């Protein structure tokens, strides 16, 4: 059983938060699950297209190859507020220190508008719920706050927010941030790290969502 005890990705922490047994199946037992290509293809295509566009690459051939559904998602992206803001980074990978550990992750894009910084996350599916990405929200806001403060680009937590941009429905969920949330998110992240490092039993979080879990067939609780 080999586990890296110093570096924690969003996926690792998020999976433990959802279900410690799921974390064990993925990171300790290393159960490999192949997901249907169709499930991720549209999301990947749009993420790539937006990334190239924000990096000012030539996207003319990619636009010609879009499916009917992808054209709608692209249209909604071009209509979104962030397209009027300054793009600071796209597909930005980061490493942030928290106590003696490292957090590593990647955001879809970072924008600036009037001195306010916005983390953008593209959602291409149809059933997006902010409740379902609560840990991702904590992780992104905590990490980007640390980075932007260290660079002197923001002075307070409320200078940063996170937008979940739903490309299928042309809706944007805006998440604000403040100093109290910073402390709350920091505590949450450290408590998950400590649980991962201490845990030896990996209990299960059996819920109605288990049927949607990709480790369902390998789970000893079923
Ligand atoms: S099926 Fe349920 S209990 Fe089993 S790993 Fe998945 S989420 Fe956890």
Image: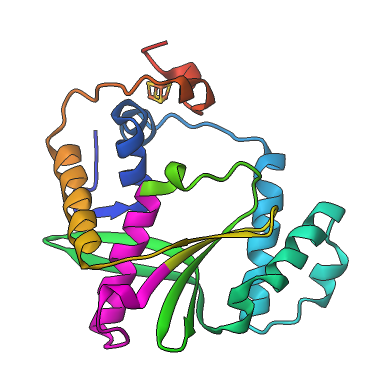
- Numbered-mark total: 0
Apparent side of residue 93 relative to residue 153 in the rendered image (left or right): right
Apparent side of residue 172 relative to residue 135 in the rendered image (left or right): right
Q: Residue at x 23, y 63 (%)?
A: 182
Q: Splitting the image into 4 quarters, where does residue 197 fall?
A: top left
**Residue 183 placed where, x, y %?**
17, 60
**Residue 220 placed where, x, y %?**
37, 13
Q: Residue at x 38, y 65 (%)?
A: 176
Q: In this view, does 2 lie above or below 145?
A: above
Which image quadrant: the N terminus? top left
Give, as a single range, the part of the protein colored magenta.
Answer: 135-161
Colouring of the image: rainbow
Q: Splitting the image into 4 quarters, where does residue 30 fall?
A: top left
Q: In this view, does 189 lie above or below 92?
A: above
Where's ligand 1: which quadrant?
Answer: top left
**Residue 71 placed where, x, y %?**
81, 61
């Amino acid at each position: 059983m080999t586990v890296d005890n110093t570096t924690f990705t969003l996926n690792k922490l998020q999976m433990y938060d959802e279900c410690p047994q799921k974390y064990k199946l993925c990171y300790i037992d290393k159960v490999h699950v192949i997901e249907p290509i169709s499930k991720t293809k549209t999301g990947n295509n749009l993420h790539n297209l937006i990334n190239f566009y924000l990096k000012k690459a030539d996207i003319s051939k990619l636009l010609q190859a879009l499916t009917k559904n992808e054209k709608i998602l692209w249209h909604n992206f071009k209509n979104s507020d962030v397209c009027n803001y300054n793009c600071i980074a796209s597909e930005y990978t980061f490493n942030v220190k928290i106590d003696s550990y490292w957090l590593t992750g990647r955001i879809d894009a970072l924008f600036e508008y009037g001195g306010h910084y916005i983390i953008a996350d593209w959602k291409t599916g149809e059933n997006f719920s902010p409740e379902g990405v609560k840990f991702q929200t904590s992780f992104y806001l905590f990490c980007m706050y640390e980075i932007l403060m260290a660079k002197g680009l923001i002075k307070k937590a409320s200078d940063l927010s996170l937008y979940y941009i739903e490309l299928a429905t042309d809706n944007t969920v805006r998440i604000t941030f403040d100093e109290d949330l910073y402390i709350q998110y920091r505590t949450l992240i450290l408590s998950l790290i400590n649980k991962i490092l201490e845990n030896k039993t990996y209990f299960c979080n059996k819920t109605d969502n288990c049927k949607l879990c990709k480790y369902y067939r390998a789970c000893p609780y079923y």
